[in-house]
Amino acid sequence: MAVEFDDTLFPDIQEVLMVYLAPLAETDTEPPLDPDVGIGIQINRVGGASDGISDFPRVAITCHHPDPRGASKLARQVANRMEYIAGEAIVVEDEPKPICIDSCRVDTPPESEPYENPDARTEIAYYALSLQKPWRR
């Protein structure tokens, strides 16, 4: 039996989530240039695994806001949006077809993170997702 090599790559989960969460605030893999005045959502893959069929990324989503209440609200908006990500068709530039997340689980709900400026705040949450390769047919 011959096994055919599949060179299709899993989508970059950071890119997928940046597109998906963009309606809430500016998204990036880095914090806003000036977190003391910037509002933004920082998305980073921080682990996970793959079995060749499905990718199981773990991501940290950090919400930056100059106001502690604003950071909390943005983090809760992100959490609410993440609850509904499974089954959504997310169109990502340079992907052959829309990306569909199979599942999303909250590993750690949004929690305040210490920050140098006591008047500003960041809230961070961790999510575990699963998705498949965008099969070309």
Image (tube, rainbow, N blue to C red):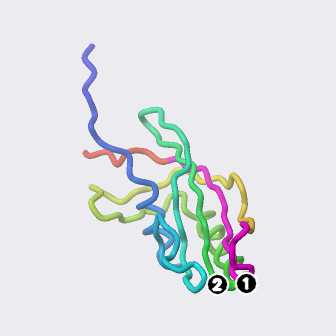
Identified at 28% across, 21% down, the residue is 3
- Taking the image as shown, residue 93 lies to the left or right of residue 56, namely left
Pick whichever, 78 or 42, lies toward us.
42
- The amino acid marked with disc number 2 is Pro
The residue at the far top in this view is 1
Identified at 38% across, 51% down, the residue is 11
Q: Which residue is mark 2?
A: 66
| Chief secondary structure of the magenta portion | strand
- Residue 60 is tagged as none
Q: CA distance from mark 2 to mark 1?
A: 7 Å
Labelled pair 2, 1 in contact (Cβ < 8 Å): yes
Q: Which residue is mark 1?
A: 119
- The amino acid marked with disc number 1 is Asp
Quadrant that contains the C terminus: top left
Q: Which residues are magenta?
A: 113-130
- Taking the image as shown, residue 37 lies to the left or right of residue 10, namely right
Q: Secondary structure at mark 1?
A: loop
Rendered location of residue 57, percent (x, y)? 53, 47
Tally the numbered discs: 2
